[in-house]
Amino acid sequence: MVGLLRSLFRHRRLVKDFVIRDLKARYVGSSMGFFWSVVFPVINLFVYMFVFRLVLNARWGDNQGALEVAVVMLAGIVVWAAFAETMSRATNTLVDNANLIQKVVFPSQVLPAYLTLSSLINMCIGLPVVVMSVLWIGHLSEPDAYLSIPVEQVRDEGGKLVHNSDGVPLQRRVDIRIGEDQDPYRMTVNVTMGRSRRVTIPFTLSGSAVEGEDYHLAAREAVLAPGYVKWHLNLTPIADGVEEGEETIVIELAEPDGASLIKGDKLSMGRRLKMTLVDRPPRAENKPVPVIAATTPSKFDPTYHPLKLGSSLLALPFLFVLQVLFTVGLGYFLSAFNLFMRDTYHLVGVGITVWMFATPIFYPGWMVADKGFGWMLIINPMHWLLEMYRGALLHGLWPQALDVLKMFGAASVTLFCGGRFFRAHQSKFPDLL
């Protein structure tokens, strides 16, 4: 492996010239030029978003909105596209450059290396799109704040579900009625996306019922810690034994700090929640009022991280090195093996597709583990690499030392084995071609 690296360093000018030539030739005659390096990942994003997000409803967690899912997918698509392109081109590169290898003394080891570098540079053109998306969604834009509105399915007089013309069951809002003798009623204040800083959402109270006399609330604002998207508010009715008739309680969100009020009201999402407080007999002496906290944050999902740019972007050059070592190693092996079995090129095309869907690019890894196939992630170096890229690009997380060591070990072994196989048969290349 050391000899191979020395040879590449010795021919570094040739590698550079090949990379420049390849980058210029990619879109020669195209009016958009390198802009296609941005367009291709975005087009793929829309296709896979339609299939995996809209049709299959794939998401990484309950705290993640559609825009976050799109950015997570885009980061995976950009990195994977560079890897897949290198594998496909490197496998057939010796055959494509047979005239150079057969007619002159040519250092064929530069061919898989320059293809890897060319694809990496092309990938770097698409990465700013990911970074700008994180900047816009995670820092410059604000999530929507809303109250969860309970809904129920519509049934006819016979108790059967009512469907619309598309066959979807109809829903309607539930008329919330709370008896004075009932346990506390729990409401939920939400934001559509977790933020890297605290979000405060105040709310106002109105209606004929009087806070402190007819019901009790311990807070007048929802405070969501960084990364949280839900906050629960418990309204405790007070059984005063006084006949007052039905009274109303209206909770309405005010202008939040760190978020925006949702535009209009949807069926299950709104800015205003109305309840009816119903007179009931006071509780029996042997039935104490339950002690329940007035406000509770939602259970935090430790796997969820809000979109955030940070100093972890400085880790990208190290990830580039790991990607190059791993990809070049595979390229050396496949390009040489393809001369012995020309079907390798076609098998690699199929294998790349299988590998892509076995790697959590369009779905979260925990779905694979839950189905009992977690071992597929444990043995998949591209899964390790993609997760490190996503952490550094999307969430401001530095790669874990163990993950870096695993990837470095896999890349080193791949480069050693692939390079050794390539060098062992390099003298046979002219005859095999």
Image (cartoon, rainbow, N blue to C red):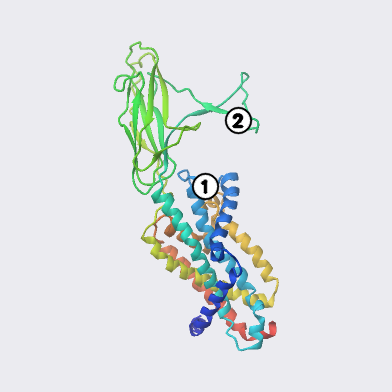
Q: Are marks 2 and 1 in contact (CB under 8 Å)?
A: no
What is the crowding at mark 1: few (fewer than 14 residues within 10 Å), some, or many (at least 20)?
A: many
Sequence order check: which comes first, mark 2 or mark 1? 1
Nearer to the camera, 332 or 268: 268
Is 226 left or right of 42, judged from the image as shown? left
Percent of width and height locating residue 182 = 39, 21
Secondary structure state at the residue bearing disc 2: loop
* Residue 172 appears left or right of 395: right
182 or 206, nearer to the observer = 206
Write the residue at 62% across / 26% down: 162
As drawn, 417 above or below 392:
below
Residue 224 in the image: above or below residue 160: below
The quadrant in which residue 314 appears is bottom left
Q: Position of residue 52 (x, y in %)?
A: 58, 49
The residue type indicated by label 2 comes to: Pro
Question: Residue 101 is drawn in which quadrant?
Answer: bottom right
| Residue tagged 2 | 169
Report whether 229 appears left or right of 13.
left
Image location of residue 216, percent across then percent down = 32, 25
Residue at the spot x=47%, y=32% of the render?
265
In this image, 263 relative to 214: left or right?
right
Can residue 379 be seen in this snapshot?
no
Residue 302: horizontal and vertical position, in percent? Answer: 41, 48
- Secondary structure under tag 1 reads loop
Distance from the alpha carbon under mark 2 to that under mark 1: 24 Å
The structure residue drawn at horizontal position 60% and vertical position 49%, both measured from the top left corner, is: 51
What amino acid is labelled 1 in the image?
Arg
Instruction: Say which residue appears at 34% left-offset and 29% top-offset.
Output: 204
Establish if 376 lies above or below 63: below
Residue that sits furthest to the top in the current view: 243
Which residue position holds label 1? 59
Q: Is residue 246 visible?
A: yes
